[in-house]
Amino acid sequence: MPHLSRALIALGLAGILSVMVPANADAVTIELKDVAPDRIERQRKFAEGSLPLPDTPDLSKLSARLEAFGSKAGAAMLIRIFKAESELEIWLRKGDAFERFATYPICHWSGTLGPKLKEGDKQTPEGFYTVTRQQLHQGGRHPRSLNLGFPNAFDKSQARNGSYILVHGACSSVGCFAMTNAVIEEIYNLSEASIKEGQEHLPVHVFPFRMTAANLNEHKASPWIDFWLNLKDGYDAFERTRQAPRVSVCNNRYEFAEPAPQEGGAPSPLAACGATAAAIETLEPYYKAASHQPLLWQRVLATLTPSQKQSYAERKNLVAARRPLTKRATETATKGERVQALRAPLQASEAASRPATRISTLKCSLQRPSCRRFVSLAQKSLHTRRPRTAANAR
């Protein structure tokens, strides 16, 4: 069996197939699409039980490492993630500034450089997130994990959706950052200690790569270069002050400010300006359906008639067309006028969009017969109420 495993992995490294490789009682998926060889190599080591991964700190000596660092569990904490380098950093507060305590290799992350756009794209996010007490997860598939809180206010303003994007254990990922079980145990314990000591918001900054001039120049042809330059503003703010910057979202951009003196450098939650808040509010029906109930939403879409699918597509196009209104409304209108301007395109097309809108509010499990009957009746009812046109009157 070990020889077969090595042969299958060799084929995987050659890009020939995707395999499940047994390792003791566990298994790991060798994911190949657009994956750099170093990520596949780490999955191979995990599959063979070659742990800890190279450059992992001595996890058995956490207390001694903290003492040598001059800090303790419970100090204010900040996490930075660099996708291209497959590294996760923990920074702890010492005195008036953060200092880097540890760097861990990321065993695996899925997707490519660039942000996560939608549920099911298997892409890891990029941006500025916060972890609260409610986002410390215990149990389930991964005994310990941190929920990054995707989508944040910026993602929502861009109509991006997804759910349960985690930093977790093991070495297989579908949109998450897999750290191995031993490493996530240390990260989780440090995060939990900081939150229990009063840190309400634990910042997590996720970058495509270390935001150096050389790396940005190497990727200057990327369609995401403007977004990455915006992320660099936040990267530079932290590098300059070693304080967690105050992060807000406005006009389709992240904005950064140094913490006020009275805040004592305490990290703050991600805030949205009035225009962005208005955009998020008007996107809420679409966002709730696609993000809060992704499985139900996908199943309902699969059952729609062609005319209903067309209505749904029209509504999505209207949502996309609405984004430029955010900036124009911000520059010329009051908050109330902004909300009305942003809602106008949807109100004008409400009749055509109603099937997708009504179905998006369903809150039941399709595994239950009663729910399936309800969905069927709702679809029939909505279809019969669809306005008659020259096309469907025949």
Image: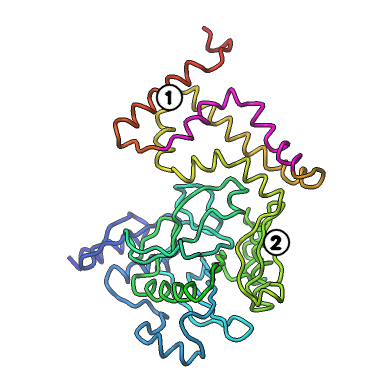
Tell me the SS state at disc 1. helix
Tell me the SS state at disc 2. strand
For disc 1, the neighbor class at 10 Å (few under 14, some 14 to 19, many from 20) is some
Query: Could you tell me the amino acid type at mark 1?
Result: Ala
Can residue 87 be seen from the camera position used here? yes
Residue tagged 1:
378
**Placement of 60 over or under 5, stated as above or below:** below
For disc 2, the neighbor class at 10 Å (few under 14, some 14 to 19, many from 20) is some
The residue at the point 56 percent across, 60 percent down is: 126
Say which quarter of the image contains residue 228: bottom right
**Placement of 352 over or under 16, stated as above or below:** above
Query: Could you tell me the amino acid type at mark 2?
Result: Glu
The residue at the point 70 percent across, 65 percent down is: 256
Residue tagged 2:
255
Q: Of marks 2 and 1, which one's residue comes earlier in the chain?
A: 2
Q: Between residues 377 and 217, which one lies in front from this camera angle?
A: 377
Query: Which stretch did the figure color magenta?
Result: 336-363
Image quarter where the N terminus lies is bottom left
Main SS, magenta region, reads: helix
The answer to if 78 sits in the magenta stretch is: no
- Residue 20 location (% of width, % of height): 27, 58
